[in-house]
Image (spheres, rainbow, N blue to C red):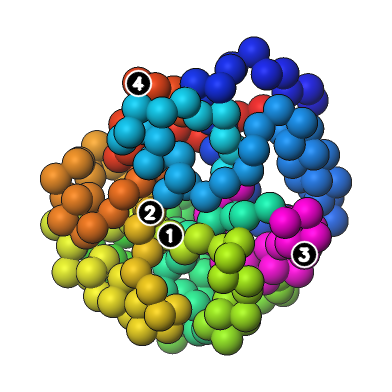
């Protein structure tokens, strides 16, 4: 993998990661070191600020889709050692509860109990999750009672999310907090409650968001995002951030 600076100072890269295990840790470190040769690492808020002010870019941001234990165990110590800032997107409903996002729990249940959770049911419930999360949560609770427990023997324990206590220990000068939008804007009250809870725990309000790949990419727009006082949002698009990019529709760079 090679990165060149052909993109120029008018472009920035958003590097997104999730679960970091022993099989992809070296690749993660190599990518960071390669990008560092050509771009200055920053937080997303600086990148979107440059978009608003029509300034040059030449920046890169490291994003983690979830606060998984593997991220704090393997990836973040490497970044802290290099004084590289990073952004962690949170789903408050999963933190400290030893739960995974609903769509991931559905996947594991389907693998463990394929006769009970067919491919058709799995697809249906995953599609419902962003429109009616409460109903899908009730469905999952029913699975635990009637089908069996979440199959922990199939799950890497570092996939689970960290506790609030571990998160607030991260260096404030390096970490940027974001919120994951895993429901549509018709559930703005649910998102707002999550942001309020984040503010209570972290003593600050998240200014950036990412739209989960499990929901309709067009569900959120600039008006609904602005109502949450956000200054940047990661969409499901791919590519580099350019002077033509919009703060509410930021793409992810793919190697």
Q: Position of residue 46 (x, y in %)?
A: 45, 45
Whole-angstrom CA distance, mark 1 to mark 2, is 5 Å
Return the residue at label 1. 178
Return the residue at label 2. 208
Question: Could you tell me if the residues under marks 1 and 3 are in contact, i.e. CB atoms within 8 Å?
Answer: no
Q: Position of residue 69 (x, y in %)?
A: 67, 71
Let me know if residue 180 is in the magenta part.
Answer: no
Return the residue at label 4. 244
Q: Is residue 163 above or below residue 211?
A: below
Residue 92 makes an appearance in the image: yes
Stretch of the chain drawn in magenta:
62-83
Let me know if residue 64 is in the magenta part.
Answer: yes
Q: Secondary structure at mark 4?
A: loop
Query: Would you say 100 lies left or right of 45 here?
Result: right
Question: Could you tell me if the residues under marks 4 and 3 are in contact, i.e. CB atoms within 8 Å?
Answer: no
Disc 1: CA contacts within 10 A as few (<14), some (14-19) or many (>=20):
many
Return the residue at label 3. 77
Q: Secondary structure at mark 1?
A: strand
Q: Position of residue 108 (x, y in %)?
A: 57, 63
Q: Earlier in the sequence, mark 2 or mark 4?
A: 2
């Amino acid at each position: 993998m090679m990165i060149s600076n052909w993109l120029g100072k008018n472009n920035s890269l958003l590097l997104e990661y999730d679960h970091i295990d022993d099989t992809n840790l070296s690749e993660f470190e190599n990518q960071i070191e390669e990008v560092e040769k050509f771009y200055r690492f920053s937080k997303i808020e600086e990148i979107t600020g440059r978009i608003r002010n029509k300034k040059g870019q030449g920046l890169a941001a490291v994003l983690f889709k979830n606060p998984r234990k593997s991220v704090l165990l393997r990836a973040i110590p490497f970044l802290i050692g290099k004084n590289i800032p990073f952004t962690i997107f949170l789903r408050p409903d999963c933190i400290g509860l030893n739960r995974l996002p609903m769509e991931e729990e559905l996947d594991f249940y389907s693998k463990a109990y394929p006769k009970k959770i067919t491919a058709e049911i799995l697809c249906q419930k995953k599609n419902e999750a962003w429109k009616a999360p409460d109903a899908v949560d009730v469905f999952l609770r029913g699975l635990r009672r009637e089908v069996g427990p979440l199959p922990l023997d199939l799950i890497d324990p570092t996939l689970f999310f960290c506790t609030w206590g571990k998160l607030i220990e991260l260096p404030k000068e390096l970490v940027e907090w974001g919120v994951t939008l895993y429901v549509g804007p018709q559930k703005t009250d649910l998102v707002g409650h999550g942001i309020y809870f984040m503010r209570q725990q972290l003593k600050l309000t998240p200014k950036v968001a990412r739209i989960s790949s499990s929901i309709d990419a067009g569900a959120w727009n600039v008006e609904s995002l602005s109502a949450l006082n956000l200054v940047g949002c990661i969409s499901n698009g791919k590519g580099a951030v350019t002077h033509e990019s919009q703060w509410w529709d930021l793409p992810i760079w793919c190697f």
